[in-house]
Amino acid sequence: MLHTVNKSPFEKNSLETCLRLISESSSVLLIEDGVYGALKNTSVSDTVINAQKTSKFYVLGPDLKARGLDKSSLISNIEIIDYKGFVDLTVKNEKIQNWL
Amino acid sequence: MEEELESGVVKKFLYINRRAPHGTVYAHEALEVVLIGAAFEQDVSLAFIDDGVFQLKKDQDTSEIYTKNFSKIYKALEMYDVEKLYVEKESLESRGLTEEDLSVDVKVIDSSEMKALITDSEVIFNF
């Protein structure tokens, strides 16, 4: 199952709730202001790193770039994907949940 | 209003920015209002708190999300005599950022200094 999060984890608890409630071997895609959840050395980094034990994390490259961020700003093992990669993920997963 | 302007009343305006750029329209709209304050020759200060600090992140490139890259406007504020930009230290730190990550010259201040700045201001706009 694919989960998308589009809110900043510092402003809303969407990411926190998503990570608390998703089942193992889910995929999590961070988009729009949700990409801030992929940053390293923040107050939420540990929560994400812990969730990486059971879920695979992706972040949308164009949204990262717009915010002045790149691979060097991120927690390791978060895959940066483009719009085509987003489409591939939606095709690959039978169900998608959007945590707004 | 016209009389006030002619008599040269200048107030301390503070624009508080607490939202990340791009995801919502707040950051961009705040800039529009800041420029109005500057045009009326007021004593303008900007504060960046919480996710507002992300507005100043350098190297923003919106070409792939097809929106206007308004982050360039922060660098131009100086031309409108808007030179007092304050960033809260605690907000930067909890987001893994340092002053080196920012695109413009700012004064990094702690919460107690931010509190004083807010108290000292006469007109406050929140975005």
Image: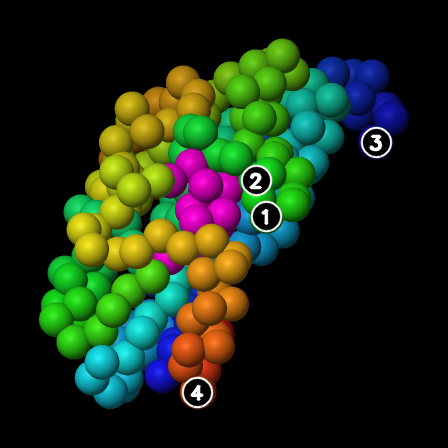
Dot 3 crowding, Cα within 10 Å, few <14, some 14–19, many 20+: few
Residue at 62% across, 51% down: B25
- Magenta stretch bounds: A59-69
Q: Amino acid at mark 3?
A: Met
Chain designation of label 3: B
Dot in front, 3 or 2: 2
Secondary element at image label 4 = loop
Of label 3 and label 2, which has the lower sequence position? 3
**Residue A87 versus residue B6: which sits nearer the camera?**
A87
Asked whether residue B43 is in view, the answer is: no
Chain of the residue under the numbered disc 4 shown in the image: A
Residue B62 numbered tag: 2
Pointer 3 residue: B1
Mark 1 — on which chain does it sit? B
Work out how far the residue at label 1 is from the one at label 3, CA to CA, in angstroms.
41 Å
Q: Residue A87: x and y, percent?
A: 51, 67
Residue tagged by mark 4?
A: A94
In the rendered view, tell whether residue A84 sits above or below residue B40.
below
**Mark 1 — residue?**
B65
Labels 1 & 3 near each other (Cβ < 8 A)? no
